[in-house]
Amino acid sequence: MDCLFCKIAHGEIPSTKVYEDEQILAFRDIAPQAPTHILVIPKEHIASVGEITEANSKLVAHIFEVIPAIAAREQLTNGYRVVSNCGADAGQTVHHLHFHILGGKVLNTEMA
Ligand code: AMP
Ligand code: ZN
């Protein structure tokens, strides 16, 4: 499968890793939209939030257990935003589930 984030997860394309374990990887976004902009992905291919099921949701729970630790390490003590774009209307450009962690400044409050 020709998936950019699968290639990053398997080390075939380089990334600036900030966290890694057997199940998930976090790395810096190549085009940061905030001083801290990190993407957290499952190593297993899941296309988007729309493909989360009972069978893979433990992986998603694990991602959300790790996000606070990443935020603490990045010193996002004043807060941060976690975003996942799902599908065309949301502007999803990479079709491998990822959660953006954005912080390090006061973020725009518009949600849509
Ligand atoms: P989305 O628009 O939600 O699908 O987000 C995809 C994100 O992946 C964008 O913020 C891109 O800047 C980021 N991105 C694309 N290619 C890379 C890459 N090779 N390394 C790190 N981030 C990337
Ligand atoms: Zn993938």
Image (tube, rainbow, N blue to C red):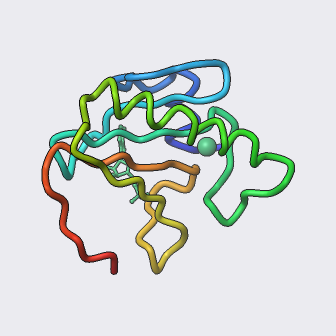
Compared to residue 41, the image places residue 108 above or below, namely below
Compared to residue 21, the image places residue 39 above or below, namely below
Compared to residue 14, the image places residue 95 above or below, namely below
Q: Residue at x 45, y 22 (%)?
A: 19
The quarter of the image holding the C terminus is: bottom left
Figure disc tally: 0
From the top left corner, tell me how far across and down residue 26 is, in percent.
Answer: 45, 31
Q: Is residue 52 left or right of residue 96?
A: right
Compared to residue 88, the image places residue 79 above or below, namely above
In the foreground, 1 or 46: 46
The quarter of the image holding the N terminus is: top right
Q: Residue at x 67, y 66 (%)?
A: 50
- Residue lying farthest right? 55
Q: Is residue 108 left or right of residue 50?
A: left
Q: Is residue 104 left or right of residue 30?
A: left
Q: Is residue 93 left or right of residue 65?
A: left
The quarter of the picture where residue 10 lies is: top right
Quarter of the displayed picture in which ligand 2 can be seen: top right
In the foreground, 74 or 14: 74
From the top left corner, tell me how far across and down residue 75 is, in percent.
Answer: 24, 29
From the top left corner, tell me how far across and down residue 58 is, in percent.
Answer: 75, 41
Q: Residue at x 46, y 80 (%)?
A: 89
Q: Residue at x 47, y 49 (%)?
A: 99
In the foreground, 108 or 41: 108
From the top left corner, tell me how far across and down residue 32 is, in percent.
Answer: 21, 45
